[in-house]
Image (cartoon, rainbow, N blue to C red):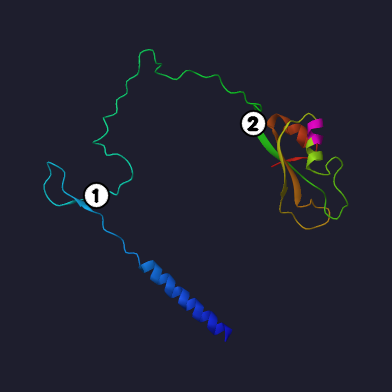
Amino acid sequence: MMIRNVHIIFFLTLILVILGACSSAPQALPTLPPPPGESGGLATAVPDQGYPSSEVLPPATATLEPGYPEQPVDLPPTVDPYPGGLVWIVRPVGIQCEEGTSPGYGDLREATSTLTAAGIAVADAEMTEMMVAASCGSPTSAHFRVQIAADDLQTALSMDWTQE
């Protein structure tokens, strides 16, 4: 009995959707007489977009006031705090089937402070999950992900981090 009620409700909903979709017919656009100088049939009006017609606006002219520079003034270059660019490095939180984490890397805050203590400027840091093989001795799926300056990459690699 319940399956029958579900079919009836579905059928009634389908009918209501079809009737709702068919109830509003598109309305025809009004027609305008042809512009002066043209003869022939009627032209179809463009729906009002809220823009003034080109006949109302004067033609655009580019005139600069005297003393106004024609070229923009050269601005000093911005200072890039990381001239070599930035790179992402990753390190697993731990090893599967082993207790705890690597020394100095208990959580994300400790991981970034260990890098900072080694002279590496940390631009951004987050925890991420990566796909790994489920076997003892393999890295855990949880990884520290840290963005550092490219110039500090070799130092990070020597600390057992991996470039992403």
Look at the image and give the residue range highlighted in magenta.
113-117
Q: Give the mark nearest the N terminus, 2 or 1.
A: 1
Picture layout, residue 67 above or below residue 58: above
Query: Main structural element of the magenta stretch: helix, strand or loop?
Result: helix
Mark 2 nearby-residue class (10 Å; few <14, some 14–19, many ≥20): few
- Residue positioned most to the top: 67
Q: Reply yes or no: does residue 52 show up in magenta.
A: no
Q: Residue 85 carries which label?
A: 2
Q: Is disc 2 placed on a helix, strand or loop?
A: loop
Q: Which quadrant would residue 72 be assigned to in this image? A: top left
Q: How far from the left and from the top, in percent, is residue 92?
A: 78, 47
Residue 7 locus on image (x, y percent): 51, 80
Quadrant occupied by the N terminus: bottom right
Label 1 neighbour load within 10 Å: few <14, some 14-19, many 20+:
few
Type of amino acid under label 1: Ala
> Which residue is drawn at the image coordinates 69% and 39% (left, top)?
88
Name the quadrant of the C terminus.
Answer: top right
